[in-house]
Image (cartoon, rainbow, N blue to C red):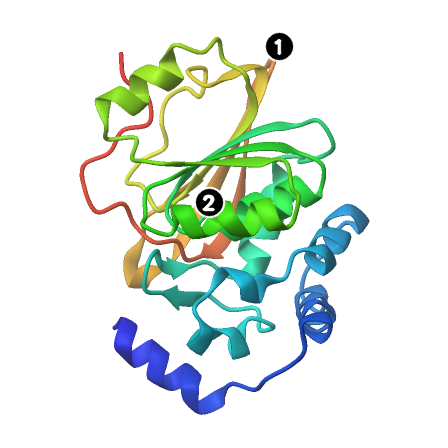
Amino acid sequence: MLFALIMVLLSTGSLASQEENGEILLSRISEHHFISPEMSEAVRTVPRELFFPDQMRMFTNEDRALPDHDAGIVPSPSSVILILQHLDIRPGTRLLIIGRGGGYAAALAAAAGADVTLLEESTAADRYREIISGLSLAASVIEGSWNDEEIRSAFSGEERPYDALFVHAAIEQVPVSISGQTGPGGRGAFPLAGSGGMQNCIIYKGSEEGFSLERVTGTAFESFKSPWVLFVP
């Protein structure tokens, strides 16, 4: 499937400069979605092409999911942007991203002012760290999997330091609570695995009165390849 997608892309892609890419991408996303001024500036600031291998860079000004040989299928920019907007990402937001292929999402959130921690399960972690550092963005990248007991223990030892959580991979079910990594009023984004590779991302928002659920439809995230739970007893 991955090889077939690459061949289709190679037959349709075109090259553009780094400056043009951001404006073209923003224009294409804005045709179908509302993009906040803060997130629009983040799209202009963060060159998406930096996060993909050379053979994929000609397609990075298109609003579509793309393959990355290190991280699998990386979701479309509009999917990531809409989820970040639903999570109310703004200056000072403490955001934890857990998953695969989350480098671009982490960079966008940091460019919008968030303080980001990315736990990247794939081998792209070192590359993401170098790119984000070169862009002088406030995002730290940790290579590892939530399946790793030491990783879970390290995060569990912290006192719920995050305002928002973004699971950057398809999972089987929404966790009952996001209280393990977020404080009161925390928000969480959970793409639910579906048929045909598409998912619905459920947005959880907590408050003193209870919680609310919202939905971002038609997303396509790489699935975790091993049994995975977000919160352990």
Q: Which residue type does callout 1 highlight? A: Glu
Left or right: 170 in relation to 150: right
The answer to whether residue 35 shows anywhere in this view is no
- For residue 184, the mark is none
Q: In what element is the residue under mark 2?
A: strand
Q: Using the rendered image of the protein, determine whether residue 187 is visible from the camera's viewpoint.
A: yes
Which residue in the protein does label 2 denote?
201
Q: Residues within 10 Å of mark 1 (few under 14, many from 20)?
A: few
Q: Position of residue 12 (x, y in %)?
A: 48, 89
Residue 208 is marked as: 1
Where residue 131 sits: x, y (%)?
A: 54, 52
Quadrant including the C terminus: top left
Which numbered disc, 2 or 1, marks the residue that appears first in the sequence? 2
Q: Amino acid at mark 2?
A: Cys
Report x, y in % for residue 210. 56, 15
Q: Is residue 185 left or right of residue 204?
A: right
